[in-house]
Amino acid sequence: MERKKVTLPEIQRKKEMGEPITMLTAYDVSTARAVDQAGIDMILVGDSYGMVVLGYDTTVPVTMEQMLTAAQAVARGAKNPLLIGDLPFLAYQVNAEEAIRNAGRFIKEANMDAVKLEGGREIAPTVRAITNAGIAVMGHVGLTPQSVSKLGGWRTQGTTAQAARKLLDDALALQDAGAFAVVLEKVPDRLAELVTQRLQIPTIGIGAGVHCDGQVLVTHDLLGLFDRFVPKFAKQYAKLYPLMLEALSEYKREVDTRAFPAPEHSFPIKDAEWDAFLKALDEERETHATNTFDPTADTERVYG
Ligand code: KIV
């Protein structure tokens, strides 16, 4: 059956009908195509790109230009999922005007359907400003990696009564500001369940238990492509890194032993053309030899 483009009302309908919502990250065209073909509802071009593809230790150094390049590639590959561009650090924190401009770049230059940003009550006015400009916004509370230093590391959030209360208030503030969904990252499952029940918009969990309206994973974690560490909340559905290493090593072995390329990877030229080519070379050589022969030349080499 032909898949239809996923829209915001469809995401909201799933929340209301209790149907799980699926989201994965992608940063390139092939992954985007595969995620689309797997029937996933939403693709997040996450700033995790900075860590799993660009090799930074955190998401903090990622720039708007890097995010736009990745988002453009994803949009060329995925036609059906709702596409969300992740606003990188300092693309929306300085003021609402800059936030609208950067959010707008994802829509105008990279064909995204929505943007995501991190933060709670403090960022709600910015969420309001971006949605007022006609751009859909997904919120993100709990562990917000752009503030990892301020949070004191990659620790679970909302683990005290006071922090749990703050997290609920943050999620409600994002909803009131017009966000269409909220990511809950690395929070206790009971808290995520309560937030999910209190919100009218969907919650998308990552390390937030099974009771969120939807789930998101970093696709490199799911595929076992990222070899540096595996977060506790990520399930590896494949282990592609060792497979990749094996294939690369096999290639090296075959080039070293001249087993690759084989005849089936090479291109022929017809015998008649080849013979004509060799004959032409011979004739050229003979003509050259005749033209350059000078019997009076002193061919003996002397020093001095
Ligand atoms: O950047 C990202 O991949 C994210 C997800 C972890 C939600 O923000």
Image: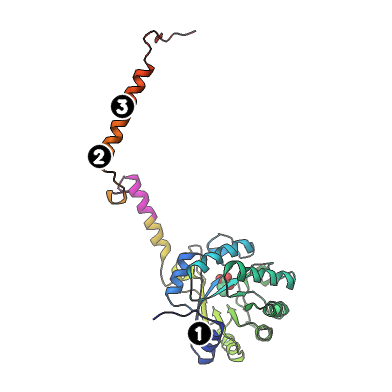
Q: Residue at point 44% right, 79% down?
A: 3
**Residue 220: image location, x then y, percent:** 48, 67
Residue ID for mark 1: 210
Secondary structure at numbered mark 1: loop
Q: Which sits earlier in the primary sequence, circle 3 or circle 1?
A: 1
Q: Amino acid at mark 1?
A: Val
Stretch of the chain drawn in magenta: 248-262
Left or right side of 42 for 156: right
Residue 220 to residue 209: above or below: above
Farthest residue toward the left?
271
Which label was assigned to residue 272?
2
Earlier-in-chain disc, 1 versus 2: 1
Instruction: Pick whichever, 246 or 49, lies toward us.
Output: 49
Which dot marks residue 283?
Answer: 3
* Residue 246 location (% of width, % of height): 37, 57
- Tell me the quarter of the image containing the N terminus: bottom left
Instruction: Mark 2: give few (<14), some (14-19) or many (20+) Cα within 10 Å.
Output: few
